[in-house]
């Protein structure tokens, strides 16, 4: 790092430390005087320059009315400081949900804004940095959800850091803002890359997959002892016919294991290939299991299963976050 | 591995998420703000309709029309090169139209053109800010042209509208009711009002860093330093206020209200001319002489009057004062005839304080050069009058005082008429006037008398100024109009100095007693021209209205427009024994601070926390104290979970109490009972909670 870079880096670190002390991380934060910063905005600075020019003109032309205009505009700016502060104070921020994304795609964070006060908040801008903010308003009785997208660059945890909450209501001359740490952590799945199927050991086809009700209804069989009671077609019994069991057409029962060890290439490539095959299996509705060496996810099917596998792939080899099992 | 974070089912397609929405800085401003901004622009430009050339107005209308078309989606914005070439073309036309490019009118015209052209570039929020800042400059420049009370209405309207426009530009799309914008804007302005007033009164005022004068270049108004009878006649029919006077304390009677402006000493047969604007004459009279003369003006026991004059712009340099002025608050040049001048033409309303004494002896010793000059007469003019004067002087055997009174009586005894339209006089004006027609007004009378006196060697000169005035009953101030212009004579005596002689008083004594206006009102003489707007004057309601407007204007100019260093100093002197700058500034800071505190408190009250029920409040109090001692409850924890957390740390007694509190609370909130039971449970809950708190705090401290 060059010297100026080192300097700014050092300053930024100090600022970050100071922020951590002043606005500690929390799952739910209510903005108050400790967390709100307030300064004139860029338009406010232009406004004050214009005001000063008008003041000088008024004094030099000895014109009482021009001076009065200057005074009243200055008074307006002072009043606006209070109004802008009030617009931000009392706002409660928390994380509603997040949607994970793939590398190269976006991670979606849903931030929930509510207020503890009797009056609503308007023109609130929320975002991760100054250049991409989303505007919203918050009513006193209902919560608003803001969707924030953050590009995903590498797999694993995505820690967006502090959230910028800003407002310039009502006149745009003063801006009040806060940097809020909601302990945001998003998950980024590896980008799927087509590669050879990293098949691990095959599934034991001997095992009966007593999966609840996958597949299409194929017909009725007469009841055998041992058939699960949940699969009995009870309506038939009501009609007086003997017990029957529902059978389902199992789609490809030949599930298989996807193994990290079987894939080729670097760790990341291997994970990407696995991701691709996970997605493909989900599409084909083939049951699959995931073998990541120290972690094994049993054969299964369905959205939840896929989610679990993708998360395992995304977080392979990474430290767990605080608060997670 | 499962994540503890709540999450949705992921969408498993790459690139399935929608692109992020438009960035804030590039937001197109809400459409309603366009309406407010244009409205604000139009209102701000209204006073300038009279100040800028007609074609500039046409240009602005075109811009507005174009913008409305764009707003409705029918036209597109003009391209950049069109806009720039337009501005360059306008500058070119301005340079052609205005002879002096650096004049205020040219600058304001350019400002207005740029102001409206900005409409055609209005896409984003930043553009709205540029327009609104330009609006403030347009409003300020309007005040350079006019400062009367009508501008108060303009001030309020334009201030409120620009604020509303700013508000409308800053709101989220969802809140687009126009009523809401207006109400918020007005609220902000009302909140700013008291602070603005504090700043107005207490912010230290000081003189210009470098003095600028608005070069209006208008024609000069009122009395000029040459006079022919036609000039005064013209003034006599002019509608317009010359100045306003407010006396502090005693006020002289109307007969004594002679307002001195200039003296005219040189006569060429037709016109009288002032000699004291001649630089030569000024240098001849050195300062110390004048100062001592001024001091000797007032003898003990004589009446002195203090007053404040508010003078309308005249484009000239003299200041009217009550005869004879001793001191003026403004920095003036004291003329040898005790009239006052400032060193730059008066282009905007001016106010000053002065002190005068009536009936003082002025110049008991005359400078020989002046005496000589005051005796000169052009040869060959008015032979009859000359002869007449010499004859009359001979008859009284050289008694100057008697001669003068005879001459004055001449006007009284012979049939002289006072009329503002006597017709034109020929070369020997005074002969014609005295012996043939005998019809004229103050200028003729004064001219003739001065002539006659000079013939016999009495130094005399014509004094022009104003006489009388109209009392404004509402304000108590006097209004002196242009038609109050008057001319009279000063003659010098050895022991009495310059003595005032008003021959017009001989002819129309009531003109001097009651003033021209009343005289015109009462006289049905068709020779006396009626004034414009006399309908308004003769009507009681109309007159009352006129007086009210005049009163409002006078107060406005006194307290607002002319509020300056001196006014502030007077205020401070009234309030404190030892006024100082620090006291002023601290007063300002304190008053503003007080208002801001009041507003802050009002805001706090307005946005107080939602009503928690009483039970909630008590529970939160309990939790607060527990939290202080044993650790704060996490937001998502239930009461039972929290109980388990502190189970290991708290005392048995406290735990039991807390358990009971929880139980009672849950019964209160989740199991509705009939009224009687609820009361019992509530009471028990309160008691238990307070006991717990006391227990905790007791051990605490």
Image: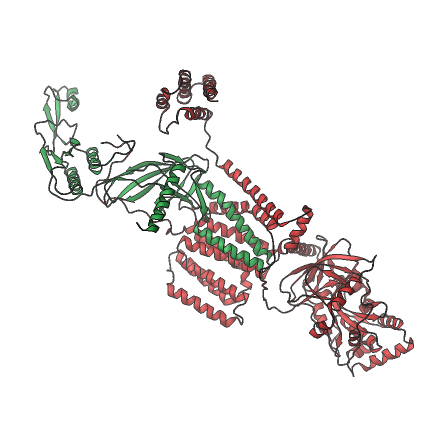
Q: Is residue A231 left or right of residue B340?
A: left
> Which sits in the foreground, B369 or A45?
B369
Where does residue B166 sit, x and y in percent of width and height?
Answer: 47, 50
Identify which residue is drawn at 69% across, 56% down: B547
Q: Quadrant of residue B554?
A: bottom right
Quadrant occupied by the N terminus of chain B: top left
Chain displayed in green: A
Where does residue B292 sit, x and y in percent of width and height?
Answer: 78, 64
Q: Quadrant of residue B490?
A: bottom right
Residue B44 visible in this rendered orientation of the protein: no
Q: What colour scheme governs how the chains and residues are painted in the rendered image of this protein?
A: by chain
Where does residue B626 sit, x and y in percent of width and height?
Answer: 42, 24
Q: Is residue B310 left or right of residue A202?
A: right
Q: Is residue B551 left or right of residue A126?
A: right
Vertical order, A51 against A266 (above or below): below
> Which sits in the foreground, B90 or A163?
A163
Identify which residue is drawn at 30% across, 46% down: B20
> Which sits in the foreground, B485 or B500?
B500
Vertical order, A281 against B179 (above or below): above
> Which sits in the foreground, B308 or B395?
B308
Where does residue B489 sit, x and y in percent of width and height?
Answer: 79, 70
Q: Is residue B613 left or right of residue B588?
A: left
Chain B rendering hue = red
Identify which residue is drawn at 38% across, 51% down: B25
Vertical order, B259 against A18 (above or below): below
Residue B107 visible in this rendered orientation of the protein: yes
Question: What number of labels is visible?
Answer: 0
User: Furthest-front residue in view?
Assistant: A3
């Amino acid at each position: 790092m060059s010297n100026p870079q080192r300097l700014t880096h050092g300053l930024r670190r100090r600022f970050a430390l100071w922020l951590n002390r002043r606005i500690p991380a929390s799952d739910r934060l209510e903005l108050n005087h400790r967390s709100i910063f307030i300064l004139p905005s860029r338009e406010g600075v232009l406004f004050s320059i214009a005001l000063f020019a008008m003041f000088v003109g008024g004094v030099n032309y000895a014109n009482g009315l021009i001076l009065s205009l200057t005074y009243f505009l200055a008074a307006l700016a002072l009043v606006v400081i209070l109004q802008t502060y009030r617009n931000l104070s009392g706002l409660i921020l928390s994380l509603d949900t997040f949607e994970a994304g793939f590398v190269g795609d976006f991670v979606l964070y849903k931030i929930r804004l509510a207020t503890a006060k009797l009056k609503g908040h308007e023109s609130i801008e929320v975002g991760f940095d100054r250049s991409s903010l989303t505007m919203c308003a918050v009513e006193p009785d209902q919560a608003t959800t803001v969707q924030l997208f953050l590009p995903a660059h590498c797999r694993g945890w995505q820690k967006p850091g502090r959230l910028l909450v800003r407002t310039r209501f009502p006149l745009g001359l003063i801006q009040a803002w806060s940097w809020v740490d909601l302990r945001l952590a998003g998950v980024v799945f590896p980008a799927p890359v087509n590669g050879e199927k990293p098949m691990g050991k095959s599934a034991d086809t001997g095992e009966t997959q007593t999966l609840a009700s996958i597949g299409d209804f194929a017909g009725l069989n007469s009841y055998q002892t041992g058939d699960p009671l949940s699969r009995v077609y009870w309506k038939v019994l009501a009609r007086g016919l003997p017990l029957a069991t529902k059978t389902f057409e199992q789609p490809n029962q030949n599930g298989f294991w996807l193994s990290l060890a079987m894939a080729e290439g670097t760790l990341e490539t291997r994970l990407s290939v696995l991701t691709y095959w996970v997605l493909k299996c989900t599409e084909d509705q083939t049951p699959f299991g995931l073998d990541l060496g120290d972690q094994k996810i049993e054969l299964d099917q369905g959205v939840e299963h896929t989610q679990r596998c993708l998360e395992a792939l995304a977080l392979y080899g990474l430290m767990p976050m605080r608060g997670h099992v | 591995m499962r994540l503890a974070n709540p999450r949705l089912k992921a969408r498993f397609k790459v690139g399935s998420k929608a692109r992020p929405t438009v960035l804030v800085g590039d937001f197109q401003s809400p459409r309603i703000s366009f309406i407010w901004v244009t409205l604000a622009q139009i209102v701000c430009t209204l006073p300038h309709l009279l100040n800028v050339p007609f074609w500039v107005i046409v240009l602005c209308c075109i811009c507005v029309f174009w913008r409305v078309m764009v707003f409705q989606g029918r036209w597109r914005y003009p391209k950049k090169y069109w806009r720039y070439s337009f501005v360059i073309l306008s500058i070119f036309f301005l340079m052609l139209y205005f002879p002096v490019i650096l004049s205020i009118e040219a600058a304001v015209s350019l400002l207005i053109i740029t102001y409206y052209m900005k409409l055609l570039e209005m896409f984003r929020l930043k553009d709205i800010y540029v327009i609104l800042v330009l609006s403030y400059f347009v409003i300020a420049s309007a005040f350079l042209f006019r400062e009367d009370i009508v501008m108060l209405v303009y001030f309020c309207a334009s201030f409120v509208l620009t604020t509303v426009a700013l508000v409308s530009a800053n709101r989220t799309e969802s809140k687009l009711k126009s009523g809401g914008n207006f109400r918020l804007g007005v609220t902000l302005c009302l909140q700013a009002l008291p602070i603005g007033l504090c700043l107005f009164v207490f912010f230290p005022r000081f003189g210009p860093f470098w003095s600028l004068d608005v070069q209006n270049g208008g024609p000069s108004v009122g009395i000029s330093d040459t006079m022919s009878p036609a000039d005064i006649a013209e003034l006599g029919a002019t509608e317009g206020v010359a100045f306003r006077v407010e006396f502090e304390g005693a006020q002289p009677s109307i007969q004594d209200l002679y307002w001195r402006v200039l003296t005219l000493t040189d006569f060429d047969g037709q016109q009288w001319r002032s000699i004291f604007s001649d630089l030569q004459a000024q240098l001849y009279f050195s300062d110390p002489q004048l100062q001592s003369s001024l001091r000797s003006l007032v003898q003990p026991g004589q009446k002195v009057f203090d007053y404040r004059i508010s003078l309308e712009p005249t484009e000239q340099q003299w200041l009217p004062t009550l005869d004879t002025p001793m001191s003026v608050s403004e920095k003036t040049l004291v003329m040898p005839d005790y009239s006052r001048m400032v060193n730059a033409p008066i282009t905007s309303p001016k106010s000053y304080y002065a002190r005068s004494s009536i009936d003082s002896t002025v110049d008991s010793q005359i400078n020989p050069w002046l005496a000589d000059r005051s005796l000169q007469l052009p040869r060959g003019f008015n032979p009859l009058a000359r002869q007449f004067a010499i004859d009359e002087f001979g008859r009284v055997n050289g008694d100057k005082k008697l001669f003068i009174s005879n001459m004055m009586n001449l006007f009284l005894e012979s049939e002289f008429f006072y009329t503002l339209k006597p017709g034109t006089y020929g070369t020997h004006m005074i002969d014609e006037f005295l012996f043939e027609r005998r019809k004229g007004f103050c200028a003729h009378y004064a001219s003739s008398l001065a002539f006659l006196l000079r013939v016999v060697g009495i130094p005399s000169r014509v004094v022009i100024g104003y006489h009388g005035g109209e009392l404004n009953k509402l304000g108590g101030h006097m209004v002196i109009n242009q038609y109050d212009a008057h001319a009279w004579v000063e003659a010098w005596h050895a022991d009495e100095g310059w003595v005032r002689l008003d021959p017009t008083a001989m002819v129309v004594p009531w003109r001097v007693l009651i003033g021209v206006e009343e005289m015109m009102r009462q006289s049905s003489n068709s020779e006396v021209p009626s004034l414009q707007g006399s309908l308004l004057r003769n009507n009681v309601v109309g007159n009352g209205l006129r007086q009210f407007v005049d009163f409002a204007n006078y107060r406005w100019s006194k307290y607002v427009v002319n509020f300056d260093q001196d006014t502030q100093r007077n205020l401070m002197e009234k309030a404190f024994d030892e006024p100082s700058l620090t006291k002023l500034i601290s007063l300002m800071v304190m008053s503003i601070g007080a208002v801001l505190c009041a507003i802050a408190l009002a805001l706090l009250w307005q946005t107080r926390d939602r009503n928690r029920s009483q039970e909630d409040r008590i529970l939160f109090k309990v939790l607060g104290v527990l939290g202080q001692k044993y650790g704060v409850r996490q937001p998502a924890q239930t009461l039972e979970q929290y109980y388990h957390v502190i189970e290991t740390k708290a005392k048995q007694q406290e735990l039991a109490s807390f358990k009971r509190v929880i139980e009672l609370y849950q019964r209160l909130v989740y199991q509705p009972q009939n009224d009687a039971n609820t009361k019992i449970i509530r009471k028990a809950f309160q008691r238990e909670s307070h006991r717990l708190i006391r227990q905790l705090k007791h051990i605490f401290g």
